[in-house]
Image: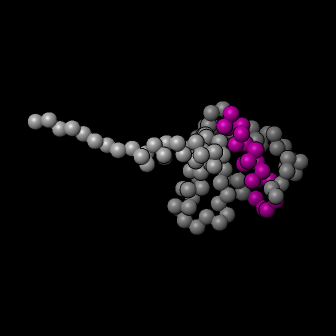
Amino acid sequence: MPAGADDVVDRAGLLGELATRLQAGHSLLLAGPRRTGKSGLGREVLPRLSSDGTCVADADLFRVTSVEELAVRLLASVAENRLGSWPRAVKSLAPLAEVLRTASVSATLHD
């Protein structure tokens, strides 16, 4: 489990700084030894950004081995952020899929 809120000194100040920089379009890298709160900070700043209208994604990249797999994980995370849980989004598209399965296209041509 990631380190918790009580495990990081001056967490509030650091969260505010992260949110400000990310909203300004900066790329950030959180580096440090294991269990020092990097993942926890990242996960905690996402709801702050999301509530301000920023599109956010949370994807565990530990076992990602290709660019394609990275794209799928990020897409799934963004879709979940915007549409709710992934299964709910897929379920909501089921009626559209059914219509598309039975749809046909026809045309009448006149000289």
> Which residue is found at the position 62% from the left and 37% from the top?
54
Instruction: Note whether 5 is above or below 20 in the view shown.
Output: below
Percent of width and height locating residue 98:
48, 46
Horizontal relation, residue 5 to residue 32: left or right: right
Residue 75 lies, in percent from the top left, at: 56, 50
Residue at 76%, 44% (x, y): give it.
44
Q: Is residue 17 left or right of residue 67?
A: right
Can residue 36 be seen?
no
Q: Is residue 42 magenta?
A: yes
Q: Can I make out residue 62 in this image?
A: yes
Magenta segment, prevailing SS (helix, strand or loop): helix
Quadrant assignment for the N terminus: bottom right
Camera-side residue of 12 and 64: 64
Splitting the image into 4 quarters, where does residue 31 fall? bottom right
Most extreme residue toward the right is 6
Check if residue 44 falls in the magenta segment.
yes
| 44 or 78: nearer the viewer | 78
The residue lying toward the viewer, choosing from 54 and 87, is 87
Q: Is residue 59 left or right of residue 108?
A: right
Residue 84 x %, y %? 65, 42
Residue 32 lies in quadrant = bottom right
Bounds of the magenta span? Answer: 32-51
**In the rendered view, would you say 60 is above or below 63?**
above
Q: Quadrant of residue 63?
A: bottom right
Q: How many marks?
A: 0
Residue found at x 79% / y 39%: 13
Q: Residue furthest top?
A: 52
Give the residue displayed 58% in from the left and 47% down from the top: 90
